């Protein structure tokens, strides 16, 4: 039995129309129809809600449909570390901004009569960009390797 067939059977056991199920899941009736016809699959969040609504395990919903099982596994890998990736990218960005600020100040001081000084410690502007970009780069690389391994 495919996921769509299982979904339709469970919905009918509860006596719900596609519209009623869609309202409970905060999706459109067309989405429910596509899931039941095998044209599309729900996200993992919706699958969890379906499991709760029908009072069956996620395994009972997914086990019969290998294509959906593969999709859920793929989706879960994609959702694994997006915030961590964003943090590492932000570290690299901040490191580059600090480096750019230091270069601009040095060039302004050298080629103009202006005398700008950098606020904060010299360590921050001398080693901060290097440390931030290295930590961000290593972190991103480790995430990339973990995706390849899985």
Image: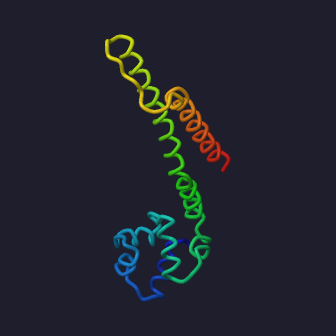
Residue 116 sits above or below residue 65 on the image: above
Residue 48 to residue 135: above or below: below
- Nearer to the camera, 19 or 110: 110
Q: How many marks?
A: 0
Q: On the picture, is 133 further left or further right than 22? A: right
Q: In this view, which residue lies farthest toward the left?
A: 113
Front residue of this view, candidates 100 and 150: 100
| Residue 98, horizontal then vertical, whole percent | 45, 30
**Residue that appears at 45% across and 33% down:** 120
Quarter of the image containing the N terminus? bottom right
11 left or right of 113 in image: right
Q: Position of residue 91 (x, y in %)?
A: 50, 39
Where in the figure is residue 46, as x and y percent of width and height? 47, 70
Q: Which residue occupies 55% across, 64% down?
A: 68
**Left or right placement of residue 44 versus residue 15 in this view:** right
> In the image, residue 55 lies at what x, y percent?
54, 83
């Amino acid at each position: 039995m495919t996921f769509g067939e299982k979904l339709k059977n469970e919905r009918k056991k509860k006596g719900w129309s596609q519209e009623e199920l869609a309202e409970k899941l905060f999706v459109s009736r067309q989405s429910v129809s596509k899931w039941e016809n095998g044209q599309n699959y729900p996200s993992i969040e919706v699958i969890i809600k379906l499991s709760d609504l029908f009072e069956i395990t996620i395994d009972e919903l997914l086990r019969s449909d290998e294509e959906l099982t593969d999709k859920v596994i793929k989706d879960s890998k994609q959702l694994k570390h997006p915030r961590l990736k964003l943090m590492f990218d932000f570290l690299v960005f901040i490191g580059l901004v600090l480096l750019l600020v230091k270069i601009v100040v040095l060039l302004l001081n050298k080629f103009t009569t202006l005398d700008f000084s950098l606020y904060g410690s010299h360590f921050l502007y001398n080693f901060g960009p290097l440390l931030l970009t290295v930590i961000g780069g290593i972190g991103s690389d480790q995430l990339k390797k973990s995706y390849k391994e899985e």
